[in-house]
Amino acid sequence: MRKYIIAGNWKMFKTRGEAVNFFLSVIDKLPSIDKVDSVICPQSPILRDLVKRQGENLRVGAQNVHFADAGAYTGEISASLLEELGVAYVIIGHSERRAMFNETDEAVNLKIKQALAFNLSPIVCVGESLSVREAGETKKFVSSQVAKALDGIEKEDVMGLVFAYEPIWAIGTGKTATPEIAEETCKDIRDTIKDLYDIETAEAVRIQYGGSVNPKNIDELLSEPDIDGALIGGASLNPDSFVEMVNAALNH
Ligand code: 13P
């Protein structure tokens, strides 16, 4: 049985005060981490503030990490610093970073390796654009992203990874993928991992769906066999809806 993982990607939203208030209001309402993993990924300057306030039922993740140990990389964040701050997860390869910050499949691969070396759990994002989907190339495109992300990574490390399938056309648009469409590609991701490694590895990896997830549609998405959680943008900013979505995972 794979444990569900519900993660909020706050992107470039919330002040420090708003973030702390959010934590104070949700912390007593979330289930134990034994039952569901819940994660919030805020802007990096407030990671420490939130790590201090996380309970046994909520973990903090970063939205990016650099692949080098240290160096002249203005504006970037090192894995060693994230580890020192007590951050548990890191989102790697989000489509916004791929599109706007030139994050390539090769960079994603190096970042995963760097995160693993510093005990950070990667949440690796993959997903196709509308034009790729309309061309019928989704499976090929997403499988290629998965294979390139995993290049040179050992089975034992792969088993602990979280993938997030986020179709770009569903992000921030209110156009959620139907559960069937989301399941189809999440299964393709698992099959790709099976082909690259073996069934044991594929069955261990957790795969989230992301793209306009909200308290109304999360239940049907989590009902799908290959969807093990959600990576949520907009709807994770509201404490009540975040709590509702994490608790929804208890019903599955
Ligand atoms: P929305 O939930 O706002 O569509 O964002 C999804 C996302 O990009 C999470 O990483």
Image (spheres, rainbow, N blue to C red):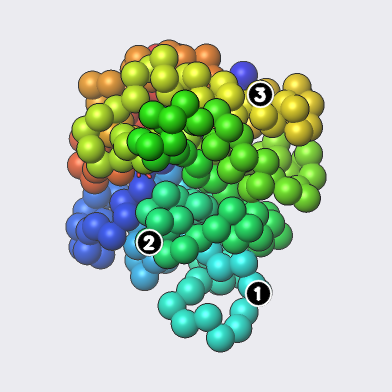
Q: Quadrant of residue 12?
A: bottom left
Instruction: Tell me the residue at 46%/14% (across/down).
Output: 224
Q: Secondary structure at mark 1?
A: loop
State the image coordinates of residue 109 (x, y, percent, origin top left): 64, 54
Instruction: State whether residue 7 is above or below residue 63.
Output: above
Circle 1 crowding by C-alpha within 10 Å: few under 14, some 14–19, many from 20:
few
Q: Earlier in the sequence, mark 1 or mark 3?
A: 1
Q: Earlier in the sequence, mark 3 or mark 2?
A: 2
Q: CA distance from mark 2 to mark 1?
A: 23 Å
Q: Amino acid at mark 1?
A: Asp
Q: Which residue is mark 1?
A: 69
Instruction: State whether residue 194 is above or below residue 40.
Output: above
Side of 211 where 182 appears, left or right: right
Instruction: Tell me the residue at 31%/35% (across/down).
Output: 170
> Mark number for residue 100?
2
Q: Amino acid at mark 2?
A: Met
**The N terminus lies in which quarter of the figure?**
top right
State the image coordinates of residue 111 (x, y, percent, origin top left): 61, 59
Q: Quadrant of residue 11?
A: bottom left
Circle 2 crowding by C-alpha within 10 Å: few under 14, some 14–19, many from 20:
few
Q: Earlier in the sequence, mark 2 or mark 1?
A: 1
Q: Secondary structure at mark 2?
A: helix
Instruction: Tell me the residue at 60%/83% (across/down).
Output: 71
* Mark 3 close to ligand 1, CB under 8 Å: no
Instruction: State whether residue 99 is above or below residue 25.
Output: below
Whether residue 242 is visible to the viewer of this picture, yes or no, is no
Q: Quadrant of residue 135?
A: top left
Circle 3 crowding by C-alpha within 10 Å: few under 14, some 14–19, many from 20:
some
State the image coordinates of residue 201 (x, y, percent, origin top left): 73, 29
Q: Which residue is mark 3?
A: 191
